[in-house]
Amino acid sequence: MPAASAATQGLPTIAVLVTPFSTASVAYGLTDLFQSAVRDWPIVVDGRLGLPALCPITVGRQAGPMQVANGATVQVSSALANCRPDVVIVPDLRFAPDEPITATFADELEWLQRCHAAGTLVTAACTGAILPAAAVLLDNEDATTQWAFCDAMQQLHPRVRVRPQRSLVVSGEG
């Protein structure tokens, strides 16, 4: 079920997945992008303030403050167990390309699989693409990641068609 604030607003929920390996700038940057871009577009177009059309939230293993990779603290608004969003974005993750992550991200991988099975659109930015690959959501699909991670992603997930020359890849049904 989506976070309470989204449910009461009736808006599509976009969950930005936050882990201790995330960076605050990207996690907050994504939430700010979705909060302001849709709301502020009418100002740019015709000089009027618009209403939000999306509900971006931060989601993690538990709600509350979380210290992330760059030492900053991110306020996580919803626990994984309480959130079934319309869209998930996995932001960049700060770890070595050859670092095994399956055990480290077991809860997040299971949540991504549950979300995907329920019809949630799962997306990623930069090194965050490693999580959907590890969750077996990118098998037989085109994908990309940060350039230094492309070889490792291909080696760890040989069924993913890694496209290192592309900065944006759209794949999956529809």
Image: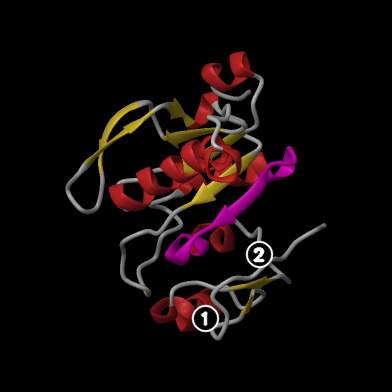
Image quadrant for the C terminus? bottom right
- Specify the farthest residue to the top: 8
Residue 116, given in percent of the width and then of the height, sits at 68, 45
Q: Residue at x 49, y 60 (%)?
A: 125
Asked whether, in this view, residue 150 is left or right of residue 23, the answer is right
The x and y percentages for residue 63 are 37, 26
Q: Is residue 111 left or right of residue 159?
A: left
Please tell me whether residue 72 belongs to the stretch shown in magenta: no
Mark 2 or mark 1, whichever is nearer to me: 2
Q: Is residue 129 visible?
A: yes
60 shown above or below 138: above
Say the numbered circle drawn on residue 155. 1
Where in the figure is residue 159, as x and y percent of width and height?
67, 75
Instruction: Tell me where residue 4 sits by quadrant.
Output: top right
Q: How many marks?
A: 2
Instruction: Name the residue located 69 percent from the left edge and 42 percent from the top edge.
Output: 120
Q: Find the magenta span and give its range.
A: 116-129
Q: Is residue 22 visible?
A: no
User: Mark 1: which amino acid?
Assistant: Gln
Disc 2/disc 1 C-alpha distance (Å) = 14 Å
In the image, is residue 122 part of the stretch drawn in magenta?
yes
Q: Which residue is mark 2?
A: 138
Q: Are marks 2 and 1 in contact (CB under 8 Å)?
A: no
